[in-house]
Amino acid sequence: MLEPGRRLDRLDPPLLDWLALVADDPLAFCLGAFPWGEPGVLEKFSGPLAWQAEIMADIKAGLLSPNQAIQLAVASGHGVGKSALVSMITLWAFFTSPDTRGIITANTETQLRTKTWAELGRWFNLCDFARDHFILNATSLVSKDPSRERTWRIDMIAWSENNPEAFAGLHNRGRRQLIIFDEASNIADKIWETVEGATTDSDTEIIWLAFGNPTRNTGRFRECFPGGAHASMWHTRQLDSRSVEITNLPRFAHWAKIYGEDSDWFRVRVRGVFPRFGEMEFFSGIEVDEAMSPDREVYVDARTPLALGVDVARFGKNSSVLVFRRGRDARSIPPRRYQGIATTELSNHIHSAIAELSPDGVYVDGGGVGGGVVDQLRQQRLAVTEIQFGGKDDITGLFGLGSGEKYANKRSAMYGALRAWLPTGMLPLSTELRKAMLCIQYTFNRKDEIQLVSKEDLLEDNPDVDFDELDALACTFGGPIAKVWGEGPLRPQAVEFEYDPFSPERMAA
């Protein structure tokens, strides 16, 4: 075994002898296989993180019982080094036992390709002997020995409830078998059940590892933990991100201040604790699809008021968006989008839209630079309602939308009204809007009020999603609205003076 911090010198000791020596000790393998302390990405580390080393020790202890599968489940917060641990264990299991077979899957194919497998590639390249004997392909890790290409391999497989059979053929009797579920909380129960059937071989080293944020109160990942139906079969650990040396403690303190330490958001993403109510998408995918269906029809007429919602862009890639909603119809008038323009120019576009379409209510996001847009519109004698997303909920129950629910702020309440409107509303056929709606998540704050996850936090996991049009649509629920006959928000001057010292008559005098 190599001393900690030393790189593997295949001549001292010979590579095959050393790999055989660490075949039952993943920590010893990791200490010798990677360039800890040397210039590069591992320069500041002397070995795996403390919690990673503890998991490796659990695996080593489990190997002492060869006829019993090692089943470890770890629920953790963000940023703890989970993907790095998955990579190190994968390479140890594969390199140290000839004819090892295995599978790695994750909650989504995107997660699997861009995070899990990408991280495996990084650690594969850090191991100086890996390329001499093994090949890491786009979807598989295989031996270079052509006679063992089918028997010595680990495959990346994206799961599908419609094709669980893809996981059914994993058997490797008499050898080592590795199964890894990444972001396991959102992997369907049917996949767990199928894989379970592959863990019945005798005289086989079976290692089944499940990692993830504890996002759901139901499902097989939750049942691995105390109180669950399958808890007796699993060794579990719940890891608070704040206990890990590499994590962003100021960021977690910020989240604690916003959401509260006992909120579901904080429990899932920091404490590694399952939520009280379960973290879910705020909008139903089925309802969104039905509202966007070309077959959806709604009834509106001349008496139905028209609302204009405006989301004001705050930085470069964002757009300012105008969205129009006439009762149940948010499709017939296309949204108007402007990028990279000054607030004065945006105000002029809003004024033009008001003059053209005579909306009965105008609701403008007044946060940040939006406050300047509101001021300019009011200077133009336009009757507009300023929306402060972080302000108090003053709309719940209007028109029966969202009644009986408690919301933490105005943003959450407007989205709640939109959600209540959705089953009978008509949305534009927009893939970007659909993506944004299905990214919205909520939690419960310490007062058990519904609180949407902030856009900034959502964008960390979904950097390419555009929330501008959705925010503008939500603004159309920013206050009560009724049909105004005449000029709508183009109001006449509130006070007319009888005496005008500059009138033509007096100037002539």
Image: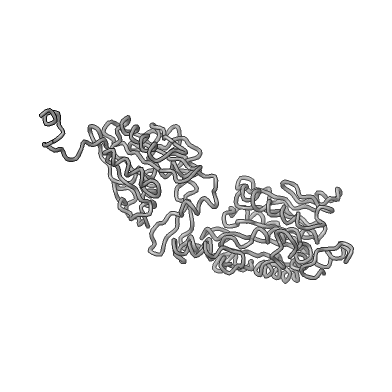
Q: Quadrant of the N terminus?
A: bottom right
For residue 470, say whether it is visible.
yes
Instruction: Look at 82% across and 63% down and name the residue there.
Output: 8
Instruction: Look at 60% across and 48% down and name the residue there.
Output: 161
For residue 223, say whether it is visible.
no
Q: Position of residue 120 (x, y in %)?
A: 71, 54
Q: Position of residue 408 (x, y in %)?
A: 37, 57
Q: Left or right? Give the position of 169 relative to 368.
A: right
Q: Nearest the camera: 254 or 196?
A: 254
Instruction: Look at 25% across and 40% down and name the residue there.
Output: 482
| Position above or below: 128 against 12 | above
Residue at far front of view: 509
Q: Position of residue 431 (x, y in %)?
A: 50, 38
Q: Left or right? Give the position of 159 relative to 46.
A: left
Q: Where, by quadrant of the figure, is residue 229 drawn?
A: bottom right
Q: Position of residue 19 (x, y in %)?
A: 83, 63
Q: Quadrant of the C terminus?
A: top left
Q: Nearest the camera: 161 or 264?
A: 264
